[in-house]
Amino acid sequence: MDKELQNNLEEGFEKLFNTPVILKKQRQNKALKKKSLFLSLIEQYEKSLIKSNKLQAEFNIDLFDYEETFYSIIDKLMLLMWGENGYDLISFYLHERIALDGSINCLFQMNEDGTESEVILNTPEDLYSYLVKINPNFLNEK
C-alpha cells in the first residue's frame, strides 16, 4: 500500500473512531504460508505431468528418461516431509485420480459407523482439505 493511501485511510479511521489509528500490513502466518506452498507444489507438479503427457501424445516426444530423476527426487522429499500416508494420497492425486478416459477416480473412506463414502478430489485445495481432515497436524509435524 502506498504511503498516501495509508495516510488517507488512517486519517479517515481516526475521524470515524475519534482515536489515533496506525495501519500495519499483517504478516501471513506460518500455517497459511505452508498451505500456500503445498498448493503451489501440487499445482506445479500436476502441470508438469500434463505438459509431459501432452508432448508424448501430440508430438511423440518422450521425456521420461530425462524427467524421471527429478520426479523421483520430488517424490522422495514429499515422502520424507509428509510420511507414507500423506505421500500415498498425494501420489494418488497426481498419478491415479484422472482415469485414462478422463473421468475422475475417487477414494473410498471408511466412516465411523462402518459405511463407506466416496471422497472426490478435484483440486489441490480438495487434496489439502482432505489431508488436514484425516490428519489435523499434516503440515505441522515436521
Image (spheres, rainbow, N blue to C red):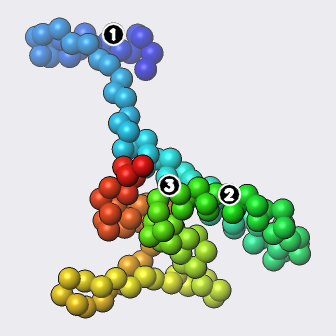
Q: What residue does disc 2 label?
A: 73
Whether residue 17 sits left or right of residue 12 in the image: it is left
Pick out the residue farthest to the right. 60
Which residue in the protein does label 1 denote?
A: 7
Mark 2–mark 1 Cα distance, whole angstroms, equals: 49 Å
Earlier sequence position, callout 3 versus callout 2: 2
- Viewer-nearest residue: 109 or 123: 109
Marks 3 and 1, how far apart in space?
Answer: 44 Å
Q: Taking the image as drawn, is residue 48 in sight?
A: no
Left or right, 84 with respect to 116, comes to right
Crowd tier of the residue under label 2, counting other residues whose Cα lies within 10 Å: few below 14, some 14–19, many 20 or above: few
Q: Secondary structure at mark 1?
A: helix
Where residue 14 appears, x then y in whole percent? 18, 11
What secondary structure is found at the residue carrying circle 2? helix
SS of the residue under disc 3: helix
The answer to whether the residue labelled 3 contacts the one labelled 2, judged by CB atoms less than 8 Å apart, is: no
